[in-house]
Image (cartoon, rainbow, N blue to C red):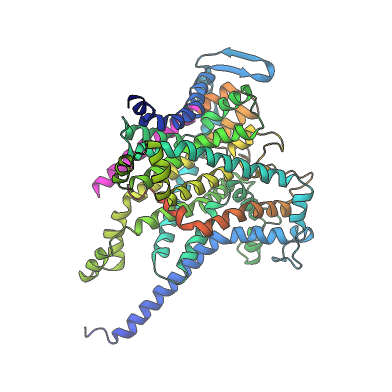
């Protein structure tokens, strides 16, 4: 009986999973922190302790501040657009209409497409000479010259945002649609009896009811957007002149292109801490919004 | 009431305007979501000569040349094999490790249950960039560079939280009585999981498998970092690094993109309900 209790202990069911996460997530995180205090150039066989000097360098590194600004701007604009568009799409898809199931499946499509494929697809659309976007703009007379979407700092960052919104809006739509489906229809019936307009019903029933789901969506998407790598890396490579370089891309380039593993690790640690704080702050703010409405 | 001369008429106008707005909105959403994909399909079917000029928008004579050259001129079959193998094995690892963990968290008494679940979720929120450097050094140390196992290890770790989260939320919905009944019948806890709970929770299992598979199939950063040759390179990396001597081979790239997207789209159309259930698990319940 005793041995059976030992072999049946619930912790044994969790241990293998925790073990893997400990080995592949927590150990490397600790290792990264240690690495950030060292100079590591594997190809030159350099390996020495340098203390906090990488962090000091980082503080004075304009490219770090630029990548931080880029990341913050990308995340805020991208998540805001995604959630607003996703809300609109969810409200439309919540209506009754023929072939609704099929339409919902089709709208979900971009979310399924590998991010790299999405980035390449948009790169092709944005192509200055043979891209379909410039072709349509020129044909319709909206512009008279070819626009270099990915070659201009301001346009490139926004081009990346549009590609990201395209890729992730379906996810927001999906969550919000699921949220809409939990609203009891009695509420709307009661509102109509009381003479409320559609807009009033939206403000006083739909929106407050959706706030928990909206918060979850914003937090999920924000954490994802702050660590953005794939879509920007493949679309612009961080260019032109690092104007679309995000924290993850800069850290990746430091470690794997200039092979400054120590400095790259310092930036990785800072990125981790920034995202951690952003998520805590966001959850705190959203909880306050949730309790005041 | 007297001011409304013809209530039916004004109602009809209101209805038509709303209908028009609705159809326009739906049309815009659908075009935004679908057109970029359709454009890839068109590109994949265009002869090379028509890729460098616009118009024509549509290929005059659709061709399968790009699909052929993806397989003939490139090691694409091998790369598809890598992607499939890594995704399947990662999914298997996640299920074998994740299901018992989810079972314990949902149905057994585990000290610090909530804390464990939250820290597991926290791992999935990790920026992968924070560990990719030192994980690379670890993988080199273990001589796993450019092997499937490097990818399976890393992908499984980041997909496990998803598996555990989805399975926990599905298992919670099953009454505890089932476990008690299984024990009365002489099952060990593991037997109860394997023979009693798994069949009941099959929809949850399907969801977890699909989400893990899609996540791994699309994963880029680890695959980019830990692979070097065709031995383990996966499709996203191949497409990102698509080599062109003088210019990007857009037609072949579009063909490759279609080839990796189609299996996912079929999965999605067949199993949409399962996937939606998984993605919204937890998020909506609060």
Q: Quadrant of residue B177?
A: top left
Magenta highlight on residue B139: no
Q: Which residue lies furthest to the left in this view?
A: A194
Residue A55 in percent (x, y) is at: 50, 21
Above or below A217: residue A99: below
The spot of residue A104 in percent (x, y) is 47, 62
Q: Nearer the viewer, residue B72 or B109?
A: B109
For residue A264, side relative to residue B61 (left or right): left
Please say whether residue B184 is visible from this viewpoint.
Answer: yes
Q: Is residue A244 visible?
A: no
Q: In front here: B54 or B74? A: B74
Q: Where is residue B78 in the image (x, y as percent from the top left)?
A: 71, 43
- Taking the spot 43% from the left edge, 71% from the top edge, the residue there is A97
Pick the residue in front: A122 or A71.
Answer: A122
> The N terminus of chain A lies in which quarter of the figure?
top left
Q: In this view, does A292 lie above or below B100?
A: below
* Region in magenta: A269-293
Q: Residue at x 58, y 45 (%)?
A: B217
Q: Is the magenta stretch mostly helix, strand or loop?
A: helix
Residue pictured at 59% horizontal, 44% vertical: A153
In the image, taking residue A113 as reference, residue A42 lies left or right, namely right
* Vertical side of A152 occupied by B156: above or below: above
């Amino acid at each position: 009986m005793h041995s059976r209790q030992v072999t049946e202990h619930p912790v044994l069911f969790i241990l293998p999973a925790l073990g893997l996460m400990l080995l592949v997530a927590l150990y490397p995180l600790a290792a990264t922190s240690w690495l950030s205090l060292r100079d590591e150039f594997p190809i030159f066989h350099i390996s020495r302790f340098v203390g906090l000097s990488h962090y000091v360098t980082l503080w004075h590194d304009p490219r770090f501040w630029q990548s931080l600004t880029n990341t913050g701007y990308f995340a805020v604009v991208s998540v805001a657009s995604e959630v607003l568009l996703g809300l609109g799409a969810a409200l439309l898809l919540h209506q009754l209409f023929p072939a609704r199931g099929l339409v919902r499946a089709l709208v979900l499509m971009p979310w399924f497409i590998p991010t790299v494929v999405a980035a390449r697809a948009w790169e092709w659309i944005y192509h200055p000479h043979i891209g379909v976007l410039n072709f349509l703009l020129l044909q319709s007379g909206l512009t008279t010259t070819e626009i270099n979407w990915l070659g201009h700092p301001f346009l490139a960052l926004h081009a990346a945002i549009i590609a990201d919104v395209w890729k992730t809006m379906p996810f927001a739509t999906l969550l919000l649609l699921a949220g809409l489906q939990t609203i009891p229809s009695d509420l709307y019936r009661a509102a109509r009896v009381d003479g409320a307009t559609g807009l009033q019903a939206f403000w006083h029933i739909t929106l407050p009811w959706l706030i928990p789901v909206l918060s979850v969506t914003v937090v999920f998407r924000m954490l994802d957007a702050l660590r953005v790598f794939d879509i920007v890396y493949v679309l612009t490579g961080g260019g032109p002149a690092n104007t679309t370089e995000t924290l993850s891309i800069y850290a990746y380039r430091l470690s794997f292109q200039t092979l400054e593993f120590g400095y790259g690790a310092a930036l990785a640690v800072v990125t981790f801490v920034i995202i951690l704080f952003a998520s805590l702050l966001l959850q705190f703010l959203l909880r306050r919004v949730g309790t005041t409405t | 009431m007297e001011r409304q001369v013809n209530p039916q008429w004004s109602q009809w106008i209101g209805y038509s305007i709303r209908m028009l707005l609705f159809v326009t909105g739906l049309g815009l959403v659908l075009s935004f979501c679908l057109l970029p994909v359709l454009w890839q399909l068109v590109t994949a079917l265009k002869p090379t000569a028509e890729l460098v000029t616009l118009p024509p928008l549509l290929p005059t004579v659709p061709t399968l040349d790009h699909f052929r050259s993806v397989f003939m001129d490139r090691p694409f079959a091998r790369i598809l094999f890598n992607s499939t193998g890594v995704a399947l094995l990662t999914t298997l690892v996640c299920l074998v490790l994740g299901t018992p963990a989810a079972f314990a968290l949902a149905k057994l008494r585990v000290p610090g249950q909530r804390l464990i679940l939250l820290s597991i979720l926290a791992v999935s929120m990790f920026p992968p960039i924070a560990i990719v450097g030192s994980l690379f050094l670890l993988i080199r140390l273990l001589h796993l560079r450019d092997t499937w196992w490097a990818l399976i290890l890393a992908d499984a770790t980041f997909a496990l939280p998803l598996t555990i989260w989805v399975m926990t939320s599905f298992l919670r919905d099953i009454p505890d009585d089932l476990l008690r009944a299984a024990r009365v019948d002489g099952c060990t806890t593991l037997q109860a999981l394997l023979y009693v709970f798994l069949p009941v929770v099959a929809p949850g299992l399907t969801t977890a498998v699909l989400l893990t598979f899609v996540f791994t199939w699309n994963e880029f950063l680890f695959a980019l970092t830990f692979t070097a040759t065709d031995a383990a390179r996966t499709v996203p990396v191949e497409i990102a690094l698509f080599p062109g001597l003088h210019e990007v081979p857009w037609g072949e790239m579009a063909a490759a993109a279609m080839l990796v997207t189609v299996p996912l789209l079929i999965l999605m159309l067949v199993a949409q309900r399962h996937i939606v259930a998984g993605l919204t698990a937890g998020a909506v319940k609060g």
